Image (cartoon, helix red, strand yellow):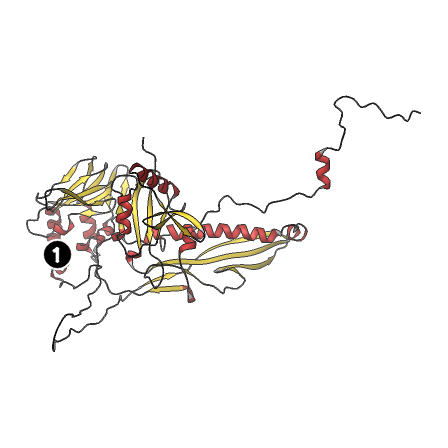
Amino acid sequence: MSTEAPEVRSGQQKSLSTAAARNLATTTKSAPQMQGKSSRWVLKTLPWVQTEGGVYRVNRRLTYTVGDGRIEFQQTGSQVQVIPRELGELALLRGFEDEEVLTDLAGRFEQQEFEPGQVLVSEGDPVDRLYLIVHGRISRIATGRYGSADRLGVLADGEQFGESHLVAEDPVWDSTYRADTAGVLLSLTRRDFAEAVDRSEALSFHVQMFGALPEQRQNKYGEAEIELASGHDGEFELPQTFVDYELKPREYELSVAQTVLRIHSRVADLYNKPMNQTEHQLRLTIEALRERQEHELVNNEDFGLLRNADFGQRIQAQDGPPTPDDLDDLITMRRNTQFLYAHPKAIAAFAKECNKRGLSLDTAEINGNRVPAWRGIPLLPCGKIPVTEHRTSSIIAVRTGEDNEGVIGLHQTGLPDEVEPGLSARFMGIDDKAVISYLVSTYYSAAILVPDAVGILENIEVRPRA
């Protein structure tokens, strides 16, 4: 029998393959990665306040500001009608609750469409009706002292003009209202309103009482005035005063985001090296809860910044994309604006507008990170701010802190089985299939201490222009 090694054929394997060698090797692994994790600047920049009892009450000075809400409509096909109870957002009808009369008034509104550049009313013309803006953007323009046409503001969906003249004698328009975009209006003539008043004793009494209300002394923020004296000599009789408070202050209850994390005991027992499966399952779950928490802080109807910003603190973009002028207007609406939050696409659109003007964004440092800034105010990306189907978005300006009368985050620490401040993972047991369950919960909310703590630049275009 021959002991000679067989001849090695051309192309035959001459050494151990890498696939076989891997069976004896130890691999180097990464921890589980998560694409949905964001910078979460809203969570990082809001100061968090311990909320015992799960409720935070915001006490304010009494204000007399009324009628600054927005009006909502119902649409059937191309036909639009104002929701009768939404007429209570008008200062003249605030507090009037006769459903039958409001329905009659709502039925008297006439629908009107307008085109870009159309002049709806002209300065100096007699006022003959009230206008409600269903959709679109309208500029208010007045003649300046030296004859220039000055834009005083921009009105958009849900706003109105002409209400203050419904019960005046021979009023005239003090401004011109010109459409910037196509849109839809509802209008109510002074004659129809007068007929509705004549037909309803309750409405007639309500309107008379509105006109007979004594003028409340208030400061420029609508707060009840505090009587003071200064610059006097001798035995001057000092005014007497007190600081009145709101009788029904707003209360913010902590909201909750929860999920049940399930891990099979065999996985937890046998597959924990080199990485602890339970720890990484919990880590990724916490990341997802924090993402949801920030989304709610921006968009929640009860406490989200976008939904709860005062309507008097909302302004419209003057010409589509956000410009330096728009951001300057937004910043100067409040003292000590500390942060600006915007969708990354909105930041890109703003940077393009700056480039067109030969301007450059500043930078600021937050927690060791360099971020873009405007006028020294950090402009922080927040992907939770929505971009609509029309490619429009918003920019949020905030002042933060309790001592600064700004925006604060609310949470409660010291929870049972707490793994992070305000977040707990409680063991729920093992079922008959050997699956371990943990209840993972985080409690949170946000409070706006005074209305001008938050401002919104609305309806900015983020799509590139052709």
Residue 143 image offset from top left, x and y in percent: 12, 44
Eyeballing the image, is 362 above or below 466? below
Crowd rating for badge 1 (residues with CA inside 10 Å; few <14, some 14–19, many 20+): some
Task: Report whether 55 appears left or right of 280.
Answer: left
| Total marks placed | 1
Q: Residue at x 47, y 57 (%)?
A: 442
Secondary structure beneath dot 1 equals: helix
The extreme top residue here reads 10
Q: Residue at x 31, y 65 (%)?
A: 59
Task: Report whether 241 appears left or right of 431.
Answer: left
Residue 387 in view (yes/no): no
Residue 413 image offset from top left, x and y in percent: 47, 63
Residue 134 image offset from top left, x and y in percent: 24, 43
Viewer-side residue, 233 vs 156: 233
Viewer-side residue, 217 vs 68: 217
Q: Residue at x 15, y 74 (%)?
A: 238
Viewer-side residue, 251 vs 394: 394
Q: Quadrant of the C terminus?
A: top left
The extreme left residue here reads 170
Q: Quadrant of the N terminus?
A: top right
Eyeballing the image, is 35 above or below 4? below
Residue 45 image offset from top left, x and y in percent: 40, 55
Type of residue at label 1? Answer: Ser
Residue 268 in view (yes/no): yes
Which residue bears the numbered disc 1? Answer: 204
The extreme bottom residue here reads 235
